[in-house]
Amino acid sequence: MKITRRQLRRIISEALPSHLQKHFRKDGSSIHEPEWEDVTPDGYGPDNMPKLKLADLVRAVDYEGDGRGGGFKPIVGKQIGTVIEIDEDPDYPTQYTVLFPDGTTIMDDLGPPGEQRFQLVNENKTKLPPTDKTIRMHMSQFKTSDDPYDVAVEIGEEYGWSQKQIEKAEKLIRSKYIR
């Protein structure tokens, strides 16, 4: 024999002590509206978090302690990496995948304010010339069947390369990545 939701609520309300019964209706539902209070500390909400974009240049930040559980200080990495993937999930912090010139990758979120895991590099992208190092950071986005010139143009748009620099990049791409 099954009981209905209404019957279940009535059983529960009858089992409640008299001083708690005043908080429920006859059908067992609460007479109080739920009260929500935002307890998010300042600087931690989704509106306050900085956002990185694809192809942003960043340095990894690590934290080094004194070995006795205190005195953590940020150590900024020397290599400049490129954000190559962004994984946005509404239930978790946004994850960023960063590719460094030596081929290593890091996937992490930005971390709470004051404990950032990536530092945005304020260097202008136009300063990066079309070198193997610059091009290698972008090649995971392309297929071997893509036209080397089109690939060079797309990468060059991000860095503001001239026509001469795009042609140099095309030669590099054709010789090392796409034949």
Image (spheres, rainbow, N blue to C red):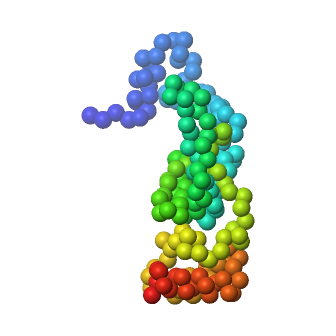
Q: Is residue 119 left or right of residue 140?
A: right
Q: Position of residue 120 (x, y in %)?
A: 67, 54
Q: Is residue 160 left or right of residue 105?
A: right
Residue 17 appears in the picture as rendered:
yes
Relative depth, front residue between 57 and 64? 64
Relative depth, front residue between 107 and 136? 136
- Quadrant location, the N terminus: top left
Above or below 73: residue 85: below
- Determine the residue positioned at 58% across, 60% down: 81
- Determine the residue positioned at 48% across, 85% down: 175
Residue 152 appears in the picture as rendered:
no
Name which quarter of the figure residue 45 lies in: top right
Relative depth, front residue between 147 and 63? 63
Above or below 9: residue 108: below
Q: Position of residue 96 (x, y in %)?
A: 55, 55
- Quadrant location, the C terminus: bottom left
Above or below 45: residue 143: below
Above or below 162: residue 138: above
- Determine the residue positioned at 64% across, 51% down: 119
Name which quarter of the figure residue 66 lies in: top right
Q: Position of residue 19 (x, y in %)?
A: 54, 11
